Image (cartoon, grey):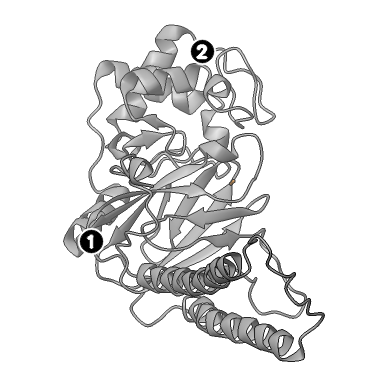
Amino acid sequence: MVVLAGCGGDYPQSTIDPVSGDFGSAIQGLYRLVFWWTMVILAVVWGVLAYVLFRYRSRPGAPEPKKIRGHLGLEIGWTLGAAVIVVLISVPTIQVVFRTQLQPEEGALVVEVVGRQWWWEFRYPAEGVVTANELHLPVGRKVALQLRSADVIHSFWVPRLGGKRDVNPWVREPDAAAPRVNRLMLTVDEPGIYPGQCAEFCGPSHGLMGMRVVAEGEAEFQEWVRRMKGAAPPQLGSLADRGREIFMRSSCIACHAIEGTAAQGAIGPNLTRLGARTTLGAGLLQNTRENLIAWIRDPASLKPGVKMPGVAEGGGGLPPTGLTEEEVEAVAAYLASLE
Ligand code: CUA
């Protein structure tokens, strides 16, 4: 145990170090509750075991101990005891489940989370912003996530914010006024960047379906919203200009949208201000020029099954883009300029 403890380090996806005072702390409280109850069970079982081993150990000349068959009192005792512990664990658990999926409160920031193979879409309906894979949230304000999937079942999990929640295909019940979504209410208390991960097996690149939560002050968040809406047009150089031309006349725009341009595809990740993101490919790669070029050139080599065509290989039902290396570099320059 001591040696293993030495392996401890700075793990950004720690579930026992919450930065969310409501959801994260509630989940940690449940974790501790279960932990201490299992410790009680462990102590009782091992205590009885140790006593029996010592008390009835083999000794030269000792008679065989008396055999007992069935003991009503004991059986009632351990059945009731176990049942009481289950109730003491399940009641607080169910309370937390219901408390964290209420309808959005007044003043809460509503974000629609759409799970897709294999990336995350984040839509801010009141702000009119759509982005992918990096969820910007203001610190100290109640956030109401509305989770649904565009394809198969995913699971939203940012360990430092709290537990997982299933992201299910949008079920429209016959008589319901609105489609049913899963909800998650939480508040982030500390600014920072918190990585998360899809936690439900969803296909070949399930393990590469990452995301980041960027928690920032209210003013910075508002500034991000303002810039996402195209208040700051990108500064283009000649290579980036050429990249924009190529992007707008190629199959890129069949799937991708960039705010303020003719690109309005809704199948792939929204690329508005891609240059300002920290990672590419749903948390897979650092957002550098080299990685962006590698991604555009051959995404399937980086993310198996990806629904995006590369230069020489089709994907997502689209033929290969057939871009030259110079054109790939130009498109990368354009996307990187979108800050
Ligand atoms: Cu999405 Cu696993």
Cα separation between marks 1 and 2: 44 Å
Q: In this view, does 301 lie above or below 203?
A: above
Q: Quadrant of the C terminus?
A: top left
Could you say whether the residue bearing mark 2 is in a helix, strand or loop?
loop
The quarter of the displayed image where residue 166 is located: bottom right
For marks 1 and 2 on the same chain, the one whose residue lies earlier in the sequence: 1
Q: Which of 20 and 170 is in front in this view?
A: 20
Q: In the image, what residue type sits under mark 2?
A: Leu
Query: Measuring 39% from the left and 47% from the top, which residue is drawn there?
Result: 1
The quarter of the displayed image where residue 189 is located: bottom left
Q: In the image, what residue type sits under mark 1?
A: Glu
In the image, residue 287 lies at what x, y percent?
33, 30
In the image, residue 97 lies at what x, y percent?
53, 76
The quarter of the displayed image where residue 90 is located: bottom right
Q: Name the residue under label 1.
A: 190
Query: Measuring 33% from the left and 69% from the top, which residue is drawn there?
Result: 187
Q: Which of 297 and 207 is in front in this view?
A: 207
Dot 2 alpha-carbon crowd within 10 angstroms: few under 14, some 14 to 19, many 20 or more: some
- Whether residues under marks 1 and 2 lie with C-beta atoms below 8 angstroms apart, the answer is no
Q: Residue 323 carries which label?
A: 2
In the image, residue 263 lies at what x, y percent?
47, 37
Q: Is residue 205 above or below residue 174?
A: above
